[in-house]
Amino acid sequence: MGKVKILAVVGSLRVASYNRQLAVAAQEKVNHTAEFELLDFADVPLFNQDIEFPAPESVRRVREKVKASDGIWFFTPEYNHFFPGVLKNLLDWLSRPVSDTEPQVLAGKPAAISGISPGMSGTGLAQDHLVPLISFLNMKVMNVPRLTIPNAQQQVNQNGQLELTASAPYLEKQARAFIDLIQKKK
Ligand SMILES: Cc1cc2nc3c(=O)[nH]c(=O)nc-3n(C[C@H](O)[C@H](O)[C@H](O)COP(=O)(O)O)c2cc1C
């Protein structure tokens, strides 16, 4: 069996995002068993039905990335006990049919969810809101294990770089579980 293809979707556009760094840490964990790509969607415009067809080039590009993947791994911050608007905007675009003959591209894709936050909740509330949305879109959500990392500062060095200690085994466990789930589905 070839390597599974995981597409990472980070719900923060911030260059130094802890969640982006968590995705990079996940990439290091799966390197031998999976292809892993971070989705670049910073150029996806605000959803507007007036510009839906033909889809903007950036939307076509992200749809192709989703279609080519075997599973989507979300790494999302928590904003006001929710997940950020940039992620909702991306999911709104991806929730729409590609054309009259081609349905939306998320249905049936396995999904894993992780997040890191300087606060106490570790993005658990954001994740609890993300699950019903992606379930509605018919993704196959891996509810166990999910990964929530609170108190980010405890695992960030003086330069703002993530250095996972206590959470490293949990990330590894989640990576193994997700790859296993994808392989069973293939
Ligand atoms: C608009 C806004 C709302 C936030 N709300 C929460 C929150 O509800 N819970 C939380 O733990 N952190 C909250 N934070 C802090 C974020 O967790 C923190 O900025 C985090 O570093 C963002 O993720 P990133 O590092 O991946 O960009 C909020 C930050 C912003 C900008």
Image: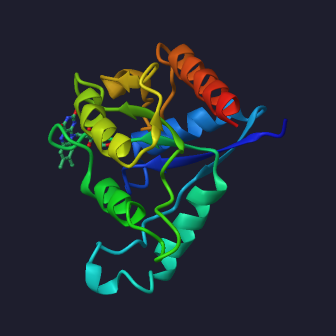
**Residue 1 visible:** yes
Give the residue furthest to the front: 101
Q: Nearer the viewer, residue 106 or 47?
A: 106
| Residue located at (26% from left, 44% from top) | 83
Q: Position of residue 70 (x, y in %)?
A: 64, 45
> Which image quadrant for residue 47?
bottom left
109 on left or right of 186: left
| Residue located at (42% from left, 38% from top) | 160
Where, quadrant-wise, is the N terminus in this rendering? top right
Q: Position of residue 98 (x, y in %)?
A: 48, 72
Q: How many callouts does the rendering have? A: 0
| Residue located at (20% from left, 41% from top) | 82
Ligand 1's quadrant: top left
Q: Position of residue 37 (x, y in %)?
A: 63, 51
Where, quadrant-wise, is the C terminus in this rendering? top right
Up-down: is 12 above or below 166?
below
116 on left or right of 174: left
Give the residue furthest to the left: 80
| Residue located at (29% from left, 38% from top) | 132
Q: Nearer the viewer, residue 127 or 167?
A: 127
Up-down: is 46 above or below 162?
below
Give the residue furthest to the right: 1
